[in-house]
Amino acid sequence: PQVCVIGLGYIGLPTAAIIARANCPVTGIDVTESVVETINRGEIHIEEVDLDGLVRGVVQRGMLKASTQIVPADVFVIAVPTPFEKDGHHTPDTSYVMSAATEVAGVLKKGDTIILESTSPVGTTEAMRDLISGLRPDLKLPGKTDETPDVAIAYCPERVLPGKILEELTHNDRSIGGITPRCARKALAFYKRFVRGTCVTTDARSAEMTKLVENAYRDVNIAFANELSMIADEMDLDVWEVIKLANRHPRVNILQPGPGVGGHCIAVDPYFIIHGAPEHSPLIRTGREVNDGKMHHVVEQATKLIEDNPGMPVACLGLAFKANIDDFRESPARFVAAKIARKFGDRVKIVEPYAAQLPREFDSTGAELVDIDFALENCGILIVLVDHDIFKVVPAEERQHAMVYDTRGIWPDAQMKQSRPGLRLAS
Ligand code: SAJ
């Protein structure tokens, strides 16, 4: 089939490339002209393991083209962002999905399949169907007719991990939610072309909720670890030691505390559930609050340590939202480092091997980007915010002189120190 993938971001572009590799001609659509030009040159505008070679190959073979204009196709895959509105209520914003659906409606023909992949509040796929039904009264849409519908509509969330996107796109199991069972079967036949994991069919609303539940589950579990870390600070305990011991129980598996939860999914998707059932989601809401609260806790603890040691240079290690990636959006590490830079100015050095320069909020703070060697030689206080491999391998003797606040638990020998950052630590 001819495929049209709408949205060429972190999910859409790898998906388009993998479909093209499976020998389906793909047109990728994006509103940003420069993104389209970059891809048509065989290059990429995002960082992801092995994506450059894959895109270059499929573009050179003529299997993937990018365009700003929608084109007719047999299968449409929508992978556009679904942020929430900055209205203080975290209301989900499905306007990008609906405008993509409007574009699809303009070129839709009998026999086509539309698949929504964007993380979406429950009911979005049906709302999209209703919108298309209004725009194309000439077509029979699923769930709107007793006869065989003219098009199939399904919801199939991605569940790939940044840094392992290509591998997980191929090997993860998929939930395929049709508006009707027939829609699910049509979408299933499409995914079978390039997914090696098991594809399980269900209805669209269950598939929508499944995606939200996966990320809310992880958020709540990380919140448990983060809450433990704050309790441990209060009780003067080493949280890493406690978690390590508790996890020896055959049915206990506590996740890792950190400076908070970042990224574009885990810190966002739980709100889609909360918004849908506010009265019945106290745990999920509290999980969000705990994880956001952890960022402020880290700022407070770090501030105490820095104030207790006047004049001593400080290094914040890491800005990324998690280890070994160059993605600084929605990052708790970046939030904490920026707060510290604003408070302590040119005492603050930032180490982030994945950054060429500091983000704009560091302008005029006096903080500067340095490498890890500079930080180890010159800074008496080290605040670990990201567990990049390059930080993990720093041997104990090279950091022995420094006071350490390790929010990620990467230096086991420094652990007793990190859990009591307010104390004056042996230097
Ligand atoms: N984190 C911790 N402690 C942990 C695990 C993670 O503090 O034990 C933090 C990370 O440092 C990061 C944040 O949580 O700041 C999220 O990282 P992550 O690796 O858990 O997840 P993401 O955001 O990279 O990707 C998630 C994945 N969802 C689940 O694992 C349930 C991925 O499979 C989804 O496809 C993705 O969200 C998405 O797009 O929804």
Image (tube, rainbow, N blue to C red):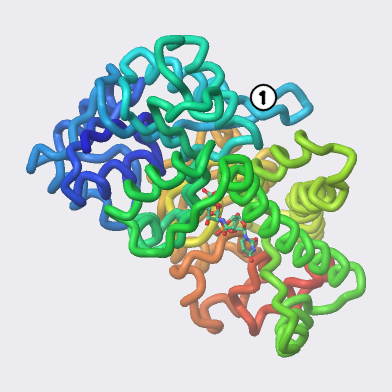
**Residue 357: x, y in percent?**
42, 41
Residue at image coords 31%, 29%: 111
Question: Can the viewer see residue 296 in this picture?
Answer: no
Query: If the image is split into quadrants, where does the C terminus sit?
Result: bottom right
**Residue 21: x, y in percent?**
19, 50
Residue at image coords 62%, 41%: 205
**Residue 209: x, y in percent?**
65, 46
Q: What residue type is labelled 1?
A: Glu
The image quadrant of residue 304 is: bottom right
Classed neighbour count for the residue bearing mark 1: other residues with Cα under 10 Å, few (<14), some (14–19), many (≥20):
few
Frontmost residue, 26 versus 160: 26
Question: Can the viewer see residue 69 in this picture?
Answer: yes
Query: If the image is split into quadrants, where does the N terminus sit?
Result: top left
Judged from this view, the residue extending furthest toward the left is 61
309 above or below 147?
below
Say which residue label 1 marks: 85
Frontmost residue, 301 versus 46: 46
Q: In this view, does 199 lie to the left or right of 332?
A: left
Circle 1 SS class:
loop
Count of numbered marks? 1
Judged from this view, the residue extending furthest toward the front is 147
Residue at image coords 78%, 40%: 274
Ligand 1 sits in quadrant: bottom right
Frontmost residue, 423 versus 138: 138
Residue at image coords 19%, 42%: 24
Q: Is residue 260 left or right of residue 27?
A: right
**Residue 220: x, y in percent?**
75, 58
Frontmost residue, 399 versus 189: 189
Q: Is residue 339 left or right of residue 325?
A: right
Q: Is residue 21 left or right of residue 247?
A: left
